[in-house]
Amino acid sequence: MTTTPLALPAAADALAWVQTRATEGMGTARRLVDALRASPPTDTMDALRQWDEISLQLSNVAAMGSLLSNVHPAEDVRGAAEKAEQDVMRLITELSLDRALYDVFAPLDPAGLDDQASRLLAKVLDDFRRSGVDQDDETRARITAIKERVTELDQEFGKVIRDDVRTIRVTPERLDGLPSDWLEAHPAGEDGLVTVTTDYPDVVPVRMFAHDADVRREITMAFLNRGWPTNDALLKEMFALRHELATLVGYDDWASYDADVKMIGTGPAIPAFIDKITEAAEEPMQRDLAILMARFRQDHPDAEHITGADASYYEELVRKEQLQVDAQQVRTYFDFAKVRQGLLDVTGRLFGLRYEPVTDAAVWHDDVTAYDVFDASADAGTAEPFGRIYLDLHPREGKYKHAAQFTLTDGVLGKQLPEGVLVCNFARGLMEHDHVVTLFHEFGHLVHHVLGGRAQWTRFAGVATEWDFVEAPSQMLEEWAWDPAVLASFATDAAGQPIPADLVARMRTGDDFGKAYLARQQMFYASMSYWFHSERPDDLTARTRELQTRYSPFPYIEDTHMFASFGHLGGYSSAYYTYMWSLVIAKDLFSAFDPADLFDTSTAGRYRDRVLAPGGSKDAADLVEDFLGRPYTFDAYAAWLAG
Ligand SMILES: [Zn+2]
């Protein structure tokens, strides 16, 4: 059976296409469910195959809805996609609480199933149990209502953040210090003032480079107040409902419910992990903060602390003056077009892939580029692709504001190809090196999605591992954006000179500066994510201030409400610790590579085959052990942090 990439619609047909794909997908799923209930299969494999087809139909609608509601330029298409996502989530909830459907699966005999089918059956039954399908009618109705409301709240929370673009208006001379290309792209208006927005391409360079401390403070305040006050009430309702849901199905709290299907295993293991990182980071954090404060005190002799409004700027000064890294010089090597091609060349070489531009693919915006992904050794022209990727990398109005990989389709062998999308917000000209690292990171998710997209079962397709593992492959791929030989292969300045190895070495030292206080900042975020869900405080601002004081290297800034735009409280809920958990594993995975030769294809190939390609078909701890030849440990991470 051959499979071909999904054909996306032309702009004029997009609205009808979204509505039809949603209606048909959900209609097919309903018909299959009706058939399962009407005549329950006695053969376990038969039942699993039908269930998998239902899962595939539902995942196709959910993925389309999530992607297009975040990226489509037309507001009505975004609205229809958002509705499709809401409708399919409602259907998924309904099915997860369908007692008659559960009764089809509960009595199935697992005897004689192969490993994968047996794993699938166990997961299906566990999903049903966690959904509360075995509860009484009244409880099931309440669970349904809670899930619908949480979905609405989560979408509204994200929308409020997306739409709340704030601006400050300043005279051009107050932007002294910013790169000339940024200044050229931000001319003064008729009233002589320049508009600076809270979108990343503005807020990041202004906080990093503007000499005027008041400008840095004003844009930081605006940035930290996005979503406030609207999201305060939305979040409190979301935390309360999640708690109620978890207790209804027999867990102590939301974090315990959520952690039960993750590597970390239990809710209380989360603050224990946060404290373990906090302690490991204490000494190196103090070391770097002392350097930062010393530089800050040259300008502010009486200062007792430095806040987040000044930290980027002074970090940059320390890097420039003490570590001889000038970010503005660094940027000259990272022209967007060369970086994008370099990313494809590097990952193609590493994972044995070839990316062929699909010039006739319908895309939702002119900025988007599409590529079919092939095995590098396959015959050009005749081979079937592994999948298709789309790169949507520049900001525009109404688009998702962060960087993330979205799924368009999950890959199931013989049924459909995996297709994924990188959605980022990079400048069109020269890039910050940080953004290059972000691009490699997100591509790590994308390549996982594609290479894991030859699954036997939809449930295990692509990035279907435990959620606290999914950031490990992406964080590991960041290492390639720091390697002198890798960077020299594509990072060249306007005269064509590759970035010098000694500059990259100094960049790395510069980046390592502050890594421990960054870890502490992350633990501040992770603690909000955990305690907001397990304690459900009345005053989120007051609790933020306390947690920031305990974990963050930088004090709370009065009259700010950072949590109101902390989008991960929606999707990651109590599990923001996962970024750091995954980093611990990423450092361990990376320890298997030869730092002198990051293009060693034998190690990369083993990693591709044992960690990425299996998708969710094994527990993540087993994937890691298959690759490393031993269980994962904390050691590589601890050594990196202390070094
Ligand atoms: Zn990521």
Image: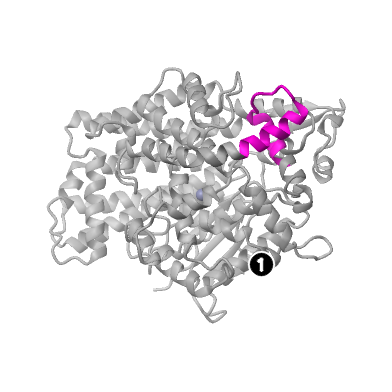
Task: Give the residue drawn at x 38%, y 43%.
Answer: 88
* Quadrant holding the N terminus: bottom left
Q: Nearer the viewer, residue 166 or 175?
A: 175
Task: Give the residue drawn at x 54%, y 36%.
Answer: 521
Inspect the magenta stretch and tell me whether residue 302 lies in it. Answer: yes
* Category of crowding for the residue at label 1, using alpha-carbon neighbours closer than 10 angstroms: few (below 14), some (14–19), many (at least 20): some
Which span of residues is magenta-colored?
288-316
From the viewer's perspective, tell me whether residue 214 is left or right of residue 603.
right
Q: Is residue 357 visible?
A: no
Q: Which residue is mark 1?
A: 485
Q: Is residue 284 above or below residue 236?
A: below
Task: Give the residue drawn at x 70%, y 26%.
Answer: 217
User: What color scheme is it?
Assistant: one colour
From the viewer's perspective, tell me whether residue 351 is left or right of residue 190.
left
Inspect the magenta stretch and tell me whether residue 162 lies in it. Answer: no
Task: Give the residue drawn at x 50%, y 24%.
Answer: 544
Q: Is residue 74 visible?
A: yes
Find residue 560 and report its horizontal and vertical position in percent.
Answer: 59, 22
Is label 1 within 8 A of ligand 1 (CB to nearest ligand atom)? no
Q: Is residue 542 above or below residue 631?
A: above
| Kind of residue at disc 1 | Ala
From the viewer's perspective, tell me whether residue 188 is left or right of residue 158.
right
Seen as rendered, the residue at the extreme bottom is 379
